[in-house]
Image (tube, helix red, strand yellow):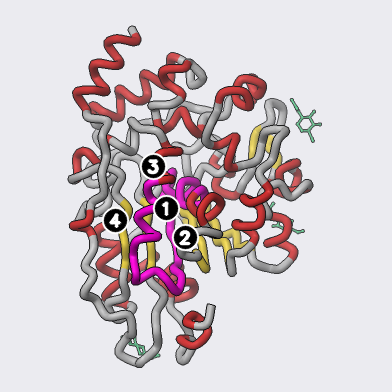
Amino acid sequence: MISRAAALLVVLGLTWKLCLACNDNSLPVTDGNGTRQLPVVLWHGMGDSCCNTHSIGAVRKRIQELLGGVFVHSIATGEGGPADSESSFFGNVNSQVEDVCKTLAGFPELQHGYNAIGFSQGGQFMRAVVERCQHTGPKAHTLITLGGQHQGVMNVPSCWNPSLNMTPSYVCSASARFLGWGATLPFIRTRLVQAQYFKEPHNIAAYKAHNDFLADINNDRDKKTPQYKKNLASLNKFVMFRFKDDTMVVPRDSAWFGWFNGTQLLTMNETALYKEDWIGLRTLNEAGKLVFDEIPGGHMHFNLEWFEDNVVEPYLRAPKHAGAKFLSS
Ligand SMILES: *[C@@H]1O[C@H](CO)[C@@H](O)[C@H](O)[C@H]1NC(C)=O
Ligand SMILES: *[C@@H]1O[C@H](CO)[C@@H](O)[C@H](O)[C@H]1NC(C)=O
Ligand SMILES: *[C@@H]1O[C@H](CO)[C@@H](O)[C@H](O)[C@H]1NC(C)=O
C-alpha cells in the first residue's frame, strides 16, 4: 500500500519550485491618485494554482486594476499550473512555508510590508508565514483569510475543482483516499498536505504527538513558541471570513477558530488557545484588531464584485495620503 502511494507521489512529482512567471516586477506602486498602495500576497487554495485565470489569476488581476497596478505576488509551490496544483495536495507544508518566507524576503517590492490573503487552506498557510517569518522577513500588515481551516478539519475534505465545474480531479480523489487511511501514519502525515491540518477530536493525543504543522502553528502542544504569538499579534488587522453554507470544511467554524471538541462546538472565545492567548488572538481581539465576517454561499463561492466590495475596498485600499505611514514602518 505504501509503495503504491510512493510510486504515485513520485509520478506526480514532489519537487516544487517558485513560479516567478507569476510576477511582474515592473509594475508601479503608486496609484493614479498618488497614494501608495501596499503590495499584496495571495496564497491559493486546494487544487488551485497561482495563476489560474478562472480563479486566483482573475483575483490578482482585479486587485491590480483597482489599486493602480499595485504589486501582487501569487504564491506558487510548484512550477507550472499542474505541478502547483498538485503541490496543494502532496508536499510538506512546513517546507512550503519556509520556502515562501525566503521568496517573500527576496522581493524588494515587499520591503515596506504587504497585505496578505489566504484562500481556503492558503489561509492557515499564510498565517504560518506571518507567525514564523514576520520578525525576519517583510511584515504583513493585514491578514485576510477566506474559509480557512484555522482549527483544522475533522473530515476528509470532498474534492473540489476550483477552475470550472467542480469535477473531482484524479489527484484530489487520491489525496482523499490517502487521508482516509490515517492522517497520523508516518508516510502520510508528512507528505499529504491535508493530513497536516487534520484534527480528529477523538484522537487529540495522536494529533499533538504527530501533527507537525497545525499543532505547531496553533501552539497546541505543551511546549509553546512565544515568537508565534508575538508575530501574529503584530498584525494591524486579522480578518477572517467564514462561508455561510460551507459543507466542505467541517466544522465550517474552523474559519473563525471554532472547534468541535468531541462533545460540542466551541467558539474561538471558549478555546484554551484563545483564553490562554497561545498565538496572540486574544491580544489582537482586545486591541480591536480581529474581524469576523461571513460570505453567503458555499466554500469558496464568491465573485469578483463581492471581492471588490468586501475585501479590496475595506481592507486593501490605502486611504489617500497614507503613503507616509507605510513608508515609515
Ligand atoms: C482615485 O480616487 C478616486 C476617488 O477616491 C477613486 O474612485 C479611484 O479609483 C482612484 N484611482 C485609483 C487608480 O486608485
Ligand atoms: C468540550 O468542551 C466543554 C466545554 O468546555 C467541556 O465541558 C467538555 O468536557 C469538552 N469535551 C471534551 C471531550 O473535552
Ligand atoms: C468572542 O467574544 C466577543 C465578545 O467578547 C464577540 O464579540 C465575538 O464575536 C466572539 N468571537 C467568536 C469568534 O466567538
Can you say whether 60 is above or below 176 in the image? below
Which residue is the site of mark 1?
Answer: 101
Q: Amino acid at mark 3?
A: Gln
Q: Give the residue at x 70% y 35%.
A: 223
Of the four image quadrants, the one with ligand 2 is top right
Q: For the residue labelled by badge 3, is the local secondary structure a helix, a strand or a loop?
A: helix
State how far apart marks 2 and 4 are (Cα): 24 Å
Which one is nearer the viewer's eye here, 94 or 297? 94
Region of the chain picked out in magenta, as a range: 99-128
Q: Magenta region's main secondary structure?
A: helix
User: What residue would you read off at disc 4?
Assistant: 56
Q: Secondary structure at mark 4?
A: helix
Q: Which mark is residue 137?
A: 2
Q: In the image, what residue type sits under mark 1?
A: Cys
Q: Circle 1 sits in a helix, a strand or a loop, which is it? A: helix
Q: Residue at x 44, y 43 (%)?
A: 121
Query: Looking at the rendering, which quadrant does residue 166 occupy?
Result: top left
Q: Is residue 302 above or below residue 189?
A: below
